[in-house]
């Protein structure tokens, strides 16, 4: 019995495939900087962030937001039940913005920050972020409204 236990404890795991080594060697941050969408999506799949296009139904398109000038915001439903915001890049710069945002949001949870629900590959060169839907206006619009109404005259 001891021999069997010892052989189990000293057995080395099989070496991973070269493809797995490549993705393990490339950090998520490096993949974002290099704009390597294959590595990014592989990491997202490993972290369970990857979504299929068919899992989100787009309901309405909204105007570009101030915080994402190179992206368009769309309201949709995730799996037909949960209201979500889908950020889609309108150009390569927007794709870089979303990759940077993905880099931060995938590990961030805070009551005042929208949650990342998933990532979709909309074509071979662009990603879409699926975020929780928050009704109302953005923080920038709120601050602008407070400034024009005079409520920040003495504060900000």
Image (tube, rainbow, N blue to C red):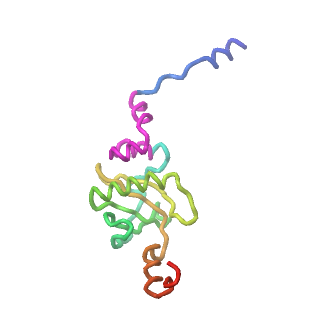
Up-down: is 56 above or below 75?
above
Q: Main secondary structure of the magenta part?
A: helix
Q: Residue at x 42, y 54 (%)?
A: 119
**In which quadrant is the N terminus drawn?**
top right
Q: Where residue 71 appears, x then y in whole percent?
A: 33, 64
Depth check, front residue: 66 or 90:
66
Depth check, front residue: 55 or 66:
66
Residue farthest toward the front in the current orientation of the protein: 154
Residue farthest toward the left in the current orientation of the protein: 91
Depth check, front residue: 67 or 72:
67
15 relative position to 93: left or right:
right
Residue farthest toward the top in the current orientation of the protein: 3
Residue farthest toward the right in the current orientation of the protein: 1
Q: Residue at x 52, y 80 (%)?
A: 155
Q: Residue at x 64, y 19 (%)?
A: 9
Looking at the rendered structure, the number of numbered marks drawn on it comes to 0
Q: Where residue 25 appears, x then y in whole percent?
A: 43, 34
Depth check, front residue: 60 or 150:
150
Magenta segment includes 36: yes
Magenta segment includes 26: yes
Up-down: is 155 above or below 133?
below
Q: Where residue 13 appears, x then y in whole percent?
A: 54, 23
Q: Where residue 24 appears, x then y in whole percent?
A: 44, 35
Q: Residue at x 46, y 27 (%)?
A: 16
Q: Which residues are magenta?
A: 18-44
């Amino acid at each position: 019995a001891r021999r069997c236990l010892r052989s189990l404890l000293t057995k080395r795991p099989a070496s991973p495939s070269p493809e797995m080594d490549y993705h393990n060697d490339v950090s998520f941050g490096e993949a974002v900087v290099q704009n390597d969408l294959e590595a990014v999506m592989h990491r997202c799949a490993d972290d369970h962030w990857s979504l299929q296009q068919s899992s989100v139904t787009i309901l309405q398109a909204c105007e570009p937001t101030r915080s994402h000038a190179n992206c368009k915001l769309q309201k949709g439903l995730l799996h037909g039940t949960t209201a979500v915001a889908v950020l889609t890049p309108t150009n390569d710069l927007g794709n870089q913005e979303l990759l940077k945002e993905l880099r931060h949001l995938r590990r961030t949870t805070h009551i005042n920050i929208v949650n990342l629900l998933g990532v979709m590959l909309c074509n071979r060169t662009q990603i879409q972020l699926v975020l929780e839907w928050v009704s109302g206006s953005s923080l920038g619009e709120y601050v602008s409204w407070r400034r024009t109404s005079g409520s920040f005259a003495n504060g900000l």
